[in-house]
Amino acid sequence: LLHFFAATYKQVFQFDAPPLHDPCAVAYVANKDLFEEQLMRVDIERTSEHCQGRTICDIFDMNRREKNCVVITKIHNVEHFWNMMIDAIELADKRSPVNQII
């Protein structure tokens, strides 16, 4: 999957390497205690002329609407988070079938 996105980003956006999508979400699943979270109302703005498509998080509960999303607000140990990411990338590289071809 990463190779597909790498080629696509190279072709479409001229990126030398693909971005990592949602590394915090993956790390949260692996180690929830690493993060601080807050339940809040989150909506996608669909009608505004100036912010259509944007994610709106009611951090301060101003609208008093039902909370519908857990939002990560802080990483308690940033160094540990990046060590997890580096370990995952190194393991993926080690096990990649592409390395068998080269």
Image (spheres, rainbow, N blue to C red):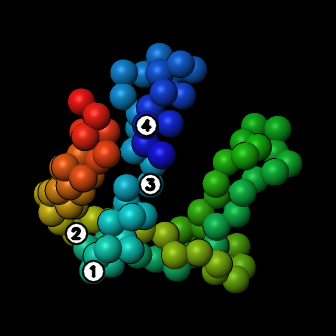
**Residue assigned mark 3:** 22
Q: Residue at x 49, y 69 (%)?
A: 71
**How many C-alpha atoms fall within 10 Å of the one at disc 4: few (<14), some, or many (≥20)?**
few
Which circle marks residue 33 in the picture? 1
Task: Verify CB contact (< 8 Å) between mark 2 and mark 3.
Answer: no
Task: Verify CB contact (< 8 Å) between mark 4 and mark 2.
Answer: no
Dot 4 or dot 2, earlier in sequence: 4
Task: Verify CB contact (< 8 Å) between mark 2 and mark 1.
Answer: yes
Distance between the Cα atoms at labels 3 and 4?
Answer: 17 Å
Which circle marks residue 76 in the picture? 2
Of the pair 85 and 50, the residue shown nearer to us: 85
Label 3 element class: loop
Distance between the Cα atoms at labels 4 and 2?
Answer: 31 Å
Distance between the Cα atoms at labels 2 and 1?
Answer: 8 Å
Dot 3 or dot 4, earlier in sequence: 4
Please say if 64 is above or below 99.
below
Question: Disc 3 vs disc 1: which is toward the camera?
Answer: 3
Q: Quadrant of the C terminus?
A: top left
Question: Disc 2 vs disc 3: which is toward the camera?
Answer: 3
Which circle marks residue 3 in the picture? 4
Residue 52 occupies which quadrant of the picture?
A: top right
Question: Disc 3 vs disc 4: which is toward the camera?
Answer: 4
Amino acid type for the residue under numbered disc 4? His
Distance between the Cα atoms at labels 1 and 4?
Answer: 31 Å
Label 2 element class: loop
**How many C-alpha atoms fall within 10 Å of the one at disc 2: few (<14), some, or many (≥20)?**
few
Label 1 element class: helix
Dot 3 or dot 1, earlier in sequence: 3
Amino acid type for the residue under numbered disc 1? Asp
